[in-house]
Image (tube, coloured by chain):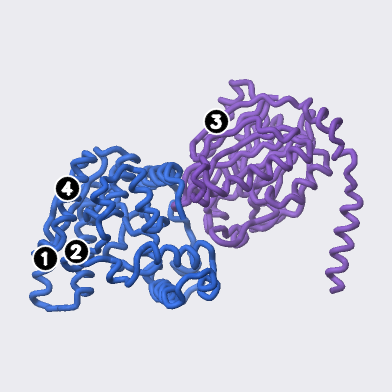
Chain colours: A blue, B purple
Amino acid sequence: MKINCQLVTRALTNFIKEESYKAGFERNIIGLSGGLDSTVCAYLAVRAVGPQNIFGLIMPFKDYDQEGVQLAEEICCLLGINFEKIDISPQVEAYFSGHPAEQPVLRGNKMARERMSILYDYSARLKAMILGTSNKSELLIGYGTIHGDLACGINPMGDLYKTQVRQLARYLGVPEKLLSRKPTAGLWPGQTDEDEIGFSYEELDKILFKLVDERLTPDEAIKTGLEEKKVRQVAELIRKSEYKRKMPPIAKLSERTVGHDFLYPYDWGK
Amino acid sequence: MKVAIAQISSILGRVDKNLDRHLELIEKAAREKADLVIFPELSLTGYSLQDLVPEVAIRPDCSEVMSRLLVASRNIDVVVGLVEERKENPGIFYNSAAYLSRGEIAHLHRKVFLPTSGLFEEGRFFASGREFRAFPAGSNRVGLLICRDFLHYSSSYCLLAGGAGLIIVISAAPGRGVLNEESQGFESSRNWELMGQAISYFSSAFVIYCNRVGLENGVTFAGGSFIYNPDGQLLFKAPYLEDDFSLREIDLDLIRKARKNRPYKRDDRPEVICYSLGRLLRKQDED
């Protein structure tokens, strides 16, 4: 599953530069968490369009991930990109004070959507295209908030598994302390992705690669030596989260319907 | 003979802007004394057209775009990619390649093998061509193929049987596969190179492959255009992923030399192939 980092970097920097330009943007904006995906995305973006054209938004909730915030600030300074820190606690707390919720998922989704809302506001203010940072592992198992962290203008990271993002991070020279951090969605203090998903990204990516890239059925994947319970669990996660990877279905009535048979390319006229 | 390969990107659905770029590069190639300039598949329109297909179609017999290209081809041969609609068959659209020479259309090839699986959906929007035919252009016999046509080796065989010494392949091949750490380009580029080497050698013909670059809807076109000579040797290789405009001199006498030394062409038996295929098809009908 090792990638050709030089080629991937070339393809992804071209992608960021060309797709942003075609959409009429000279600049890009990224929500930075201090985690690996957003950091790698920032490194790629700086290579693509230069640090002067990248803006970082760091959006902490209370003191849930102080280390992440500090690392995100360090990365911005290291890359020489402008950034702003916006505490999302007041608006999130204002909502939950009227509509209390204890479940971490509800609170986490709200935070992710608050961040999305700020990113889109800044995108319009700065005339900057939002770079999405969801990787292939997350996209495939649906580990993301719809209209939250899954929302973006373009996504350079979505065809790279988490373990491949890690490999690319080393190639791009991301600081070691970031590489050794446990991935976290910052849903509550001390939360880690791998605890929540139930297994490591190494295990997850191996299963996904067999099912998706090699197009094996779960039964065929199990025969290659992968753990049956985990393979079935991952296959089910993929199936159940398909809705997060699609535009919502539109009820078809006429001869020609948006989303069904009104078929124009995303880059129409560009 | 001097050949120019225009490894360019196109603006999706904007024939006007793409035509300007074509005319500019044709002029440049002519200025640099090229005899032939080649553009990629669907170079006038862009590739991922979907419902734009009817909107960007060109009627070669009466199109202003074609007239301007024909004027530009008075002193230099030109190969372009277009969406073609024929006068006698309105409402039917082909993914076509036109060979323009001395102000006339010397040949139109309509893509036969339309990829319709995975990320490809050509069969939803295009009609399929029905013939592979080598044709004369100046002192050469030329064959045109479009992208996937070339990956079916039977296509090139028809051109060999027709005596083509120059096989021109225009392409909009997306790059796929990044797991080879040694490669400069995408793994999928290997398909073309493998076929280019084999077909040039065993057809004793030049294979000129012109692929596009740029991005459409997140898909990167791989570039990596090339020329193999009739001995299966790589004569030219354009960079992967980058815009490129290169000129190369090709020695047409190599076709004669190769066919003299390795008489695959002389010993070819198209009647046996035709008989065998005919029998196979009749038998399939009976089954």
Which callout, 4 or 2, points at the residue further toward the start of the chain? Answer: 4
Left or right, residue B6 beside residue B98: left
For disc 3, the chain is B
Dot 3 crowding, Cα within 10 Å, few <14, some 14–19, many 20+ = some
Marks 2 and 3, how far apart at CA: 48 Å
- CA distance separating discs 4 and 2: 20 Å
Label 3 sits on residue: B245
**Secondary structure under badge 4?**
helix
Location of residue B285 in the rendering, given as x and y in whole percent from the top left corner: 84, 70
Vertical relation: A270 (above or below) A104: above
Crowd around label 2: few <14 · some 14–19 · many ≥20 (10 Å): some
**First in sequence: mark 1 vs mark 2:** 1
Camera-near label (4 vs 3) is: 4
Task: Work out whether residue B22 or residue B215 is closer to the camera in this orientation and state it.
Answer: B215
Q: Does the CB distance between marks 2 and 3 fall below 8 Å?
A: no
Tags 1 and 2 both on a single chain = yes
User: Which marked residue is nearer to the observer: mark 1 or mark 4?
Assistant: 4
Amino acid type at image mark 1: Gln
Asked if residue A175 lies left or right of residue A232, the reply is left
Is residue A123 shown to the viewer in this render? yes
Marks 1 and 2: CB-CB under 8 Å?
A: yes
Disc 1 versus disc 3: distance between alpha carbons?
A: 55 Å
Circle on res. A73:
4
Name the residue beneath numbered marker 1.
A91
Looking at the rendered structure, the kind of residue marked 3 is Phe
Q: Quadrant of residue A86?
A: bottom left
Q: Are marks 1 and 3 in contact (CB under 8 Å)?
A: no
What kind of residue is marked 2?
A: Glu
Can you tell which mark lies on residue A114? 2
Q: Earlier in the sequence, mark 1 or mark 4?
A: 4
